[in-house]
Image: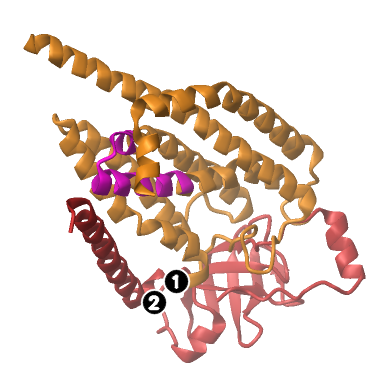
Amino acid sequence: MAIDLHKYANPTRFLRIANAIFPWSIVTTVVLLATGLYLGLFVSPADYQQGETVRIMFVHVPAAWMAMSVYSMMAVSSAAGLIWKHPVADLSAKAAAPIGACFTFLALVTGSLWGQPMWGAYWVWDARLTSMLILLFLYLGYMAVWGSFEDQSKAAKAAAILVLIGAINIPIIKFSVDWWNTLHQPASVATMDGPKIHSSILTPLLIMGLGYTSLFVTIFIIRVRTEILGRRLRMLRVNQLQE
Amino acid sequence: MTRKRRRLYIVVAAMTVLGLAAGLVLMSFEDSLVFFHSPSDLVEKPVPEGRTFRLGGLVEEGSFKKSGVEITFRVTDLAESVDVQFRGLVPDLFREGQGVVAEGQMNENGIFVASNVLAKHDENYMPPEVAESLKKAGNWKPKEDKQ
């Protein structure tokens, strides 16, 4: 397992794989997002209660999924960075953070725009909304930690510890609607007795979910590539100075 | 024990302790983490008159009355129910049989005087025709509100 992981932790090998995936991830992002938006905004029916406002969900729900899964990926990656000191682990968490922060922000804003007409309020301090806002602050705090250390290996360590502490928030977000009563509705897709969403609305939602994932992979590859090249550049400069 | 192994144990132990601590904190704050109280909660633990809190449940079928800007309805959790009085506009989703969360205080007559009314949406999404045919076929589930 550890040996296997090490293979992908090699920056050169990582770059080779990432470069091979990259053109495909661009194509799938464009196709999935275009299909998902078309089906969601034009083909799928209006909801029996919410009417046309239900369409905000196609942007909101996948953004919230991504906000949580990107953070989980950063937590796993940071743990690997702390334990095995893999060279790509910290960089990949660092590269993912601003993308995750954008997804979180998008989920909060679209949720708020949906809340006003449906609930009658842009914002309430219920457990789901509050824990999601905390997630945004965790992302911002993580990015700030990276920026506040001169020594990159120290920054990586501090940032990794922050992500792991904040990871407690992820199950809290997910189960907030089950553990406590909230204004936010309970889960509709990942429930014990199957999705509570009619297939005509669920299909575009799942396509959007895959589209967002693909978009994440695309931006993530660009960012990790930049991080790896940036690190090589720094090492070259250091070597030059020593000569 | 290698250093990698040791670091792995430290991370796992730290996460376990942190998870337990977070769990204990959340359990002890349970009362303040709920967004609203149900009518049954009020029977169990009455809130003193004049204290502001949120009351949540379903708008009881047939209980909605309107006179000018003043509306009255009953909030029920299918076991207990409470009368609510409100002056103002209610959100789009407010309707009988749907979830509602009202913020306000109990008055001396045991009526909840709301200063703000929010509609609560449930987790079901479907086109109107499907809702219609479900109702016709008698498969419409009476909604039980999450407690």
Q: Element under label 1?
A: loop
Q: Viewer-proximal residue, B46 or B14?
A: B14
> Residue drawn at (66%, 83%), measured in percent from left and top?
B78
Magenta-span inclusion, residue A77: yes
In this rendering, the answer to whether B34 lies above or below A204 is below
> Residue drawn at (76%, 52%), measured in percent from left and top?
A47
Quarter-of-image position of residue B86 = bottom right
Q: Are marks 2 and 1 in contact (CB under 8 Å)?
A: yes
Q: Viewer-proximal residue, A136 or A114?
A: A136
In this rendering, the answer to whether B79 lies above or below A223 is below
Q: Which residue is mark 1?
A: B34
Q: Which mark is residue A169?
A: none
Chain A is which colour?
A: orange
Q: Which residue is mark 2?
A: B31
**Residue B73 placed where, x, y %?**
66, 74
* Residue B125 left/right relative to A176: right
Look at the image and tell me whether residue A211 can be seen.
Answer: yes
Q: Element under label 2?
A: helix
Chain B is which colour?
A: red
Q: Amino acid at mark 1?
A: Val
- Magenta region: which residues? A69-91
